[in-house]
Each structure stands twice: as structure tokens, then as C-alpha cells.
Image (cartoon, grey):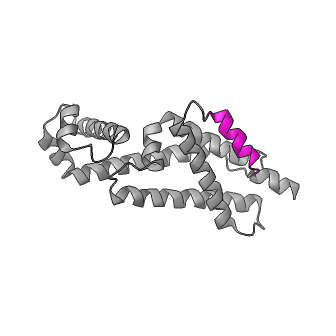
Amino acid sequence: MTGEARREQILDVTHTIVDSESFHAATPNRVAEQAGVNRSLIYQQFGSPAGLFVALIDREASRAAAQFANAITGTENPEAEDFLARVFDGVLRAADGHPATWRLFLFPPQGAPPELHERLARAEAAVRGFLTRELLRSMPDLADPDYTARIVAAVGRELLQLRLSDPEGATPERLQAILGSLKLNAGNRSRKQ
């Protein structure tokens, strides 16, 4: 196995442990044992357990950012009736395709290092920025675009958390119906005004 492949394997094992239990459970001994490597390799690759966790967080933050960017590609037409529904649907598909990545940020595990919360704050700011821009394109006279974007982001986050925590009950159709009933669709509002 190449050094990079081994590194990814260690990160994958760490992510599995963190996702199912917590950061506290991902000890160097346990990660090494489950990865089938010598514990010293973890220190060679990451410097310390904290370095391992930061590498995992950075990798998953990059993955989630790429998944979000892919999910919103082609949704930038806020005049379309189902603008926010299309954005949410794309993000929902990303979360369904990579639930462990999204759980890391939507349900930060116990013992999460501060870097996780820093990356999460940056991601939330980027999402709010996207929503603010798109809402202003369809509603240039929106009285409070920042707070509106915060509310839309909070609703989306809550719906994604429901999907990840109760996939059988929180079906995509059910979540889309809830989103539609909230009348948060920017395109609908702009046409009715």
C-alpha cells in the first residue's frame, strides 16, 4: 500500500470510530489495531492524535464543501418556482450519499477538537452567503437578507439532521413537503409580489 493509501485507510478507520462512538474512542491504539498498522505509523503520518483528528476534519470538510458545491450547481436560478427545493434536494442527495461526512458536521461528536467547530462555522457562513446572494437576486428589496438566510439555513440544517437521524421516517418526500409548506420558496414569493 502506498503511503497516501495507508494515510487514507487510517483516516477512514478513524472516521468510522468517530462516527459510531466519538473522538474519545479513536485512540491511537484502537485506530492502529483496526487499521492493521503499527501505532508508530499514526505518529509518523499525523504527528499526534490531534494531528490525526485535524487531518480527518480537513478531509471531510473538503469533501462536504465539494459535495455542497456539486449539489447547488445549476440551481442558481432563484426565479424558478422551486429554487430552494432544488437546492435542498441537491444537498439532501449529498448527505444521503455520504452520511458519515455530513453527520460529522451536523452532529459534532463528543470530544470534537476546536478545529471541527472552526470548520463548521466557516461552512455555515459560506452557506448563509450563498443563500443571501440567491435570495437577493430574486428579492432585491428583501428587508433583512442576512436574517432570512440564517432562518432558511437553520430550517435546512434541521431537516438534514432529521434525515440523518431518522432516515426511515424523514423521507425526502416528507422533508420536501415540509419545506414547501413553510412557503420559503424565493421564486414563488418574487412572482407573487
Image-based side of 129 in relation to 86, left or right: left
Q: Nearer the viewer, residue 102 or 82?
A: 102
Q: Give the x, y percent position of residue 79.
A: 78, 51
Q: Is residue 177 magenta?
A: yes
Q: Give the x, y percent position of residue 70.
A: 55, 43
Residue at point 21%, 44% (across, down): 27
Residue at point 50%, 34% (across, down): 97
Which quadrant is home to the N terminus? top left
Q: Which residues are magenta?
A: 171-183
Q: Nearer the viewer, residue 6 or 26?
A: 26
Does 72 sit above or below residue 190? Answer: above
Q: Is residue 74 visible?
A: no
Residue at point 43%, 39% (across, down): 100
Q: Give the x, y percent position of residue 182.
A: 74, 49
Of helix, strand and loop, which mostly describes the magenta segment?
Answer: helix
Image-based side of 61 in relation to 33, left or right: right
Q: Is residue 180 magenta?
A: yes
Residue at point 61%, 57% (across, down): 130
